[in-house]
Amino acid sequence: MVQRAILVGINRADSEREKSEDLLEELALLSETAGAVNAGRVLKTVKKIDPAYYLSKGMLEDIKVLILKDAADLAIIDVNLSPAQERNMSEYVGVNVIDRTRLILDIFATRARTAESKYQVELAMLNYILPRLKGSGIILSRTGAGIGTRGPGETKLETDRRKVRQRITYIKDKLKLAEKTRGLHRDTRKKQGLSTATLVGYTNSGKTTMFSALTKRGGNGENKLFATLGTKMAGVYDKDSKRKVIISDTVGFIQNLPLFLVESFKSTLEEAVHSNVLIHVIDPTQKDALRKSEEVIKILDSIGAGEKKTIVVLNKIDLLTSARVRFLQTKLEQLTGNSVIPVSAKTGDNIGMLKEKIFNNV
Ligand SMILES: Nc1nc2c(ncn2[C@@H]2O[C@H](COP(=O)(O)OP(=O)(O)OP(=O)(O)O)[C@@H](O)[C@H]2O)c(=O)[nH]1
Ligand SMILES: [Mg+2]
């Protein structure tokens, strides 16, 4: 069943309008990624939050009209709602209302491929829905299916409180084990004298494409948000020095990524924390690319990788004029305090230079 969604962007101050519009645009991409049809969208300026409904009654009425006019069966709102606000809003407008976090979780669920990332996503989802469970049912009971209720791997999410708690304990144990194995692998690599470099960056910036260009391994990138969820590793060789560096590809970041979601991916992100150097991939063709790269730096800080040696890469230069490349390069050098390498992961332009830089920095 394809769901038709009304997207509700939130602007908190007149001065933030541009940023809010950009976030709404990103919400539309996320919604499409989750498989919904975007039936309509609206940006609301909210200076005073209603504790029970988040929006004023007047705004809710507007949304109700849009829902009817566009025959929508879902509303997605671009803020994080409290469990009560989510419930009250859903009741008021007559269709399920989900927030940005629930939408991202849903995408993660459909994207998770490896056993570990499936567990990580499920854990994040269960932690998210636990405070939203009333008695033994889930709030989203009106349809009982659709975006926001799907677990990883076609499973349906557990909604019985007691069982949810049991499942959380079970998953945590599984993840501990996976983390331990990962740690052992790391120790082995260290003993072998292997250095590691981890690709980090905003979602869709080209990390996986860069990974393939560097290692000649792994498939192509995808023009999707959160195409990669697990960690992938492969070696890259330097013929001259006969050295090998392990490159890892990881999950991408996004604005307003809730901290608990970062938490649940911590073991995957541990690779970044433990690697010798980070390769921060920036997509200059994305709107607001510089602010997005700041967001990435913030998230790196929050997982304890903020002080890591970082190589900053300006990707997709095949899509830019050389004047634009020079302008962005200077800007990014000011912003990050690092020298910036312009490359194209797609055409392979300057990949050799990047390789050299990696070997000089691990
Ligand atoms: N033109 C151009 N497109 C690129 C380049 N690098 C990546 N892309 C495209 O950008 C899109 C995203 O690439 P991915 O490599 O999947 O990006 P990612 O950072 O791994 O994304 P997530 O795993 O979703 O976080 C794909 O459509 C790629 O083909 C590049 O240098 N030039
Ligand atoms: Mg990827």
Image (cartoon, rainbow, N blue to C red):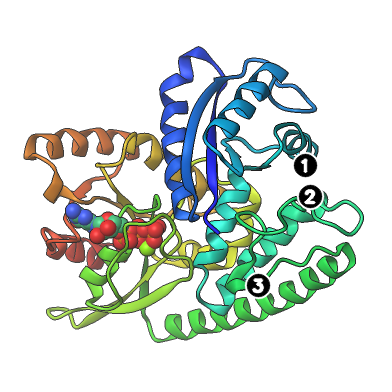
Q: How many marks?
A: 3
Of helix, strand and loop, which one carries label 2? loop
Residue count near mark 1 (Cα–Cα under 10 Å), binned few <14, some 14–19, many ≥20: some
Mark 2 and 1 residues: CB-CB less than 8 Å, in contact? Answer: yes
Residue at the extreme left of the image, as rendered: 322
On the image, the x and y values in percent for residue 230 come to 48, 70
Q: Nearer the viewer, mark 2 or mark 1?
A: 2
Q: Nearer the viewer, residue 190 or 150?
A: 150
Badge 2 or badge 1: first in the primary sequence: 1
The amino acid beneath tag 2 is Ile
Report the disc number at residue 83.
1
User: Which of the two labelled residues, at mark 3 and mark 2, occupies the earlier sequence position?
Assistant: 2
- Left or right: 173 with respect to 43? right
Element on which disc 3 rests: loop
Tag 2 residue = 139
Q: Residue at x 52, y 77 (%)?
A: 114
Q: Relative to 337, is 351 above or below?
A: below
Residue at the (74%, 77%) spot, across then down: 173
The x, y position of residue 185, in whole percent, is 50, 83
Circle 1: residue type: Pro
